[in-house]
Structure formats: structure tokens, C-alpha cells
Image: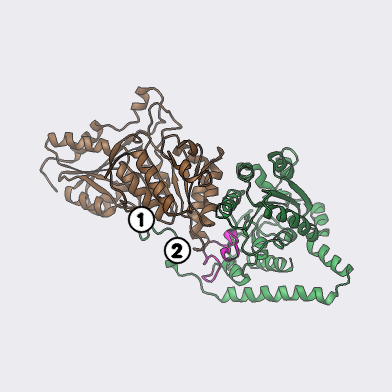
Chain colours: A brown, B green
Amino acid sequence: MALMSYSQAAATALAEAMRADRNVVALGEDLGRGGIFAQYRGLQQEFGADRVIDTPISESTIMGAAVGMALAGLRPVVEMRVVDFALCAIDELVNQAAKNRYMFGGQGRVPLVVRMPIGLWTASAAQHSQSLEAWFAHIPGLTVVVPSAPADNYGLLHSALESGDPVVYLEHKELWGDEGEVEPGLRVPLGSARVLRAGSDVTLVSWSKAVRTCVDAASELASAGVSAEVIDLRTIWPWDRATVLGSAARTGALVVVHEAVQVGGFGAEIAASAAEETGCRVKRVGAPRIPSGYSKPLEDESRVTVAQVVAAARSLAAPGVHP
Amino acid sequence: MARIRAFENAAEIASQGGVQAWGLKTSAKPALVRGPLHLSTGQEAVAAGVCANLTRKDLLTSTHRGHGHTLAKGADVDRMMAELFGKATGSNRGKGGSMHIADFSVGMLGANGVVAAGMPIAVGAAQALKIRGQPEIVACFFGDGAVNRGPFLEALNWAVVYGLPVLFVCEDNRISATTPTGPMTGGAGAAARAESIGVPAVRVDGNDVEAVDAAAARLVAEVRAGSGPRLLHALTYRFKGHVSVDPGAYRDPAEVARALESDPLTIARDRLVARGVAADDIAAIDAAAAAEIDAAMAAAAAAPLPDPASAYTDIQNTGAGQWR
């Protein structure tokens, strides 16, 4: 085991993949300097500028070129800097990368991983703070990964690189410095959730940074006599239906928590599925449908809080009473 | 060229009564080809003249008007026509149709439904060839309308920055869907824009297949030699409407009549005759093309439709089976 930050865990996984396969390359802005979050630190020094490629500020072509690279035998890792900038490359991701295999009848595949950091990032305002995972979950052909911890960032990035199809890989900008133990060689399967805490009264489902909020909420709920199960989804497409629906069936109550805007968020998909399949009661906790503001009191309006999660859970779960 | 013309003419007839547009009605009787066809009738010399200088291992990206490029790159006609018919035997197993026609087995990486979208893909493929040390090059076809999209600028710049083996081919049919491109374009167009970025560019009469061939030969040789990207700006004319059901009535009839006088096939035939090629030999080329396309039409008509279950294949391995 090795203690690593969330960013080091990703850099380590990528370096291992690049050592193992010469066809793995990375491209994006400022990668030679290690990436703006240090998530590529040391890679250009080890692998050279032909494989860790500094690019012009040309998001469409960064993404589109990666599609061409993949079709011609490479396995590119694409850096979009922040998910907000990836919107400049939405045709290349949604119409090209995601559709290529299907619309050409399986003649080719597009094994690429596109990293597009999400989330509120201290006072970064409306164009550097979004969590757009639901957009990508909506697109057939894309896998959508949302790691919350260093070990997952290591193990999921390896699995994403090995998947053979386009993967949207969404790291959270306020998790880069988080440290945790990472087991070398670990693979975290795509589509597999992790139960962080077992409980019997209510199920809390979350991903990315909001997992922390749920863990803290579960502690607070426990002191009030409510037993909360906490599930980190880790991948939102495909999502781990068996783990989530199994838990919801046992507890009879499910709260989905995410930092993204609640309206049309992926929490709605999970809540609706859980209600359809298990008849459980559901609540959602997400951001209001407002742009992220710069000033702290404005930004805080977009943050999901422990108090919100606790209130939602308590409104559903009566301690010790099961349906 | 004769094969492309025969293919386009046959496909056009088979598509009558198909997809509705331009205020026309779909026919009660289902069309053999249901989807929209962007026909390259009149533009054959560009595809033929450029692709004559490519090998099957070279790569090619195309536009929504891609039948000619695909045929000229060596794709199988039967599988192409079956794809237009939406059949299981089609090159894309019925999943793409005309707008996404492709044959990866001959390096044809796909027509594309989005204008200029093939350009970033082309430079990425070229970069992969360079990184992997392969000798092939990429031919990137795009239209005059594409020069007004951002990826045109980005991809040309990218090719210069990394010194990539790409031949950009602007197939300039002078019209962007139904709007003349000239008034929509600042400056002197594709070649001038390319030169401003550092991509050497050559303008050529795109209806003169020998001129296209000669210019492409020189540019392809330079690209193969590692000199970086080049651009060929080929001026041609779209004989048909934007899409198969579009009669193109918005164009000045006199302009269309003038264009028909410089039909690239007529120019090529006249030149062959002037050089003493027997009329019978030329007719035999046309007859062979017609027979090949007739056979492809018959085979496509007789081929089975795809199993509905195949709607769920070749999407992604991860999560396959989880459709809702």
C-alpha cells in the first residue's frame, strides 16, 4: 500500500498504463507542466513530448484528434482541463467518439478516456464549477466515471483505459489533495458501487465529492438513532443497480445526493428507478438551478450540505421502523 | 468516375419518395432507399483524381457527401449499396446509411453528418501514423462550407504544429446546403486561409480529372516525404440539390446550365476521344459501371433487413445489456 493524493493516484495509474503499452498517449493543454492540477506531473519527463502532448487551445480538435488517434491504433487520454471547457468539444465527444462504433457498424472502436474535472472549486464562479455528469450519462456509447477517493481514482482510471470504448472520466477539483492508501495493481470495475457504511433505516447514494457529505450526514444520523447506509456509486453509467436497489429494498428509503443541479440530475434517474423497482420512498438533494456565484454566500447556495442530507433522510426514515 | 456517376444516379432514383424535406411529401409506397442522400453527382473528378494517388492503406475522412470518396478509395460497391438500402449486408450493417458510409478495410474512416467534423479526426489519425512510425498519409475531404467552422482553423493549425502527413482537400462545390458560399465567406476562401496558417495550398479545376490528379500527385508526394500538411482547393459544382429530395430550384437555371456544360465526365470522355481512344472502349467503361451498379442494386434489394436485436450491438462493452 502507498499513501497517495487523488491527483498522484491518477498520475501513477496513467504512468503504469503508458509503461505497459506504447499506444497509450495523453494530450491536452499544459500537460508538459504536469497539468493544472498536477495530475500529469512527471509524465512528459518520463515519456517524452510525443506521448504526453502539449496542445494548442483547440478543444474541438483535442477531442476530435483523439478520435482519429484511437481509430488509427492509439489509446489516447484526453485532458479537457475543466468540464466547462469540454462543451467546446461536444460534437467531437457526443457525435463522433460516442457514435463511431455503432454508426459504422462495428468497423472501428474508439478507446479513449476523456478527463474533464467537475465541481465547485473555491470562488471559480459560473464557468469553472459545473457538474455535468448527467449530460454524458444520457449519451449511448459513453461510460461515465466519478471517483471520490485516491484508491478509486487509481483503480478506475486503469479500468477506464482498459475498457476499449470512450469513457468520460470526471474527477472533482476539490479532491485533488485528498490522501488515501492505494494498493498497487488495484482495478476497480466500472459499474461497481462501494458500500462505505452499512445501515438499515435509509440508503444514501452519492458520488464524487458529495460522498463525503453523506458520510458526515450518516454519522450525525447515527447519533440521532437513524441507521444510514452510504453508497458511493463510483460510476454513474453503468450504475450499480443491484447494490443500490438491494439496499433501497431493505431500508425502504433512499436519498440521492449530488453536487450537480438537482433538476434533471442523475439523482432523478436513480430515485425513479428505485421507486419503480422497490416501491421505496425517495428524496433528492442537489444544487438549486442557479449558476455558481463567485462570492462565498452565493457559492454556498450551490453546495449540498450535511444538514440538507440529514433533513432529507429524517423525513423518510423513522428509526427502527421498516415498511 | 463512371462508377461514381452510375452509383449516384441509381441511388438517386432508388431514393425517390423517401425521407421528406423541402415541403415535399413522402410517397405512400416505401422508397428503396429511405434516408437522405447527399449526392456527389458532378464532383466525381475530385474524388477520382485525389484517390488515384492514395494506397488502400492510406486513410481518408469524408463529408456527408461521401459516396464518391468511398468508391474511389476502393470500397465494395455491393456493401455500399446495401447500406443505403438499410440492409444487414451493408458496410455498416444498416446502422449508418449514406451519411455515415464507411469502409475501414480500405482506410475509409467514414462520411460524417457534421460539417468539418472529419477534419480533427483526420489530423488525429495522421498524428497516430506519425507517432507509430507508419508510412501512410491521410486525405481529408471537406467542403467549402466547412471553412467557416472552427474545426477547419483548429485542424489546419494542428497539422502545422505537429508537422502531420495530411492532404486537406477542399471540394468546393460553391454552395453550403442551399446558400451560395461566396457571400458567406470573408477573404479569398480555403486556399488563402490555409496559406495564412502555413499550409501550402494549390487551386485546381476540380472538374478536370487530369488536373486534379497531377496536383494531388505533387502534393501527396510532398506529404509522403514528410514536408507536413498540404491543401488542394478543387473548384467544382454540385449538379443536384443539397439532398436527394431537393430539386435545387433555388439556383439560377443559367448557372446550372453552364455548369452542366463542364461535366467532368464529358471533359474526360472528350479528351480520351481526342487522344484516339475508341468510342467503343469508352462506352465499355460506362457499360461495365452500369452493370456493376445494377448488380449491386439487385443484391441490395434481395438482402435481408437487420435483426432488430442488432440495434443493441456495437455500442459499448461496458454496461452492455443495461439499456434503461
Mark 2: amino acid: Ala
Image: A28 above or below A300: below
Instruction: Describe residue B15's horizontal placement relative to residue A319 as left or right.
Output: right
Asked if residue A192 is among those painted magenta in the image, a careful observer would answer no
Give the mark nearer the N terminus: 1 vs 2: 2
Q: Which residue lies at the image location 48% right of the left edge and 69% below the top edge?
A: B306
- State yes or no: residue B104 in magenta: yes
**How many C-alpha atoms fall within 10 Å of the one at disc 1: few (<14), some, or many (≥20)?**
few
Residue B129, located in which quarter of the rendered image? Answer: bottom right
SS class, disc 2: helix
Q: Which amino acid type is shown beneath numbered disc 1?
A: Arg
Q: Which residue is drawn at 84% across and 68% down?
A: B272
A309 versus A161 height, above or below? above
Q: In this view, does B267 lie above or below A160?
A: below
Residue B289 x %, y %: 71, 73
For disc 2, the marked residue is B311
- Nearer the observer, A273 or A245: A245
Q: Can residue B263 be seen in this view?
A: no
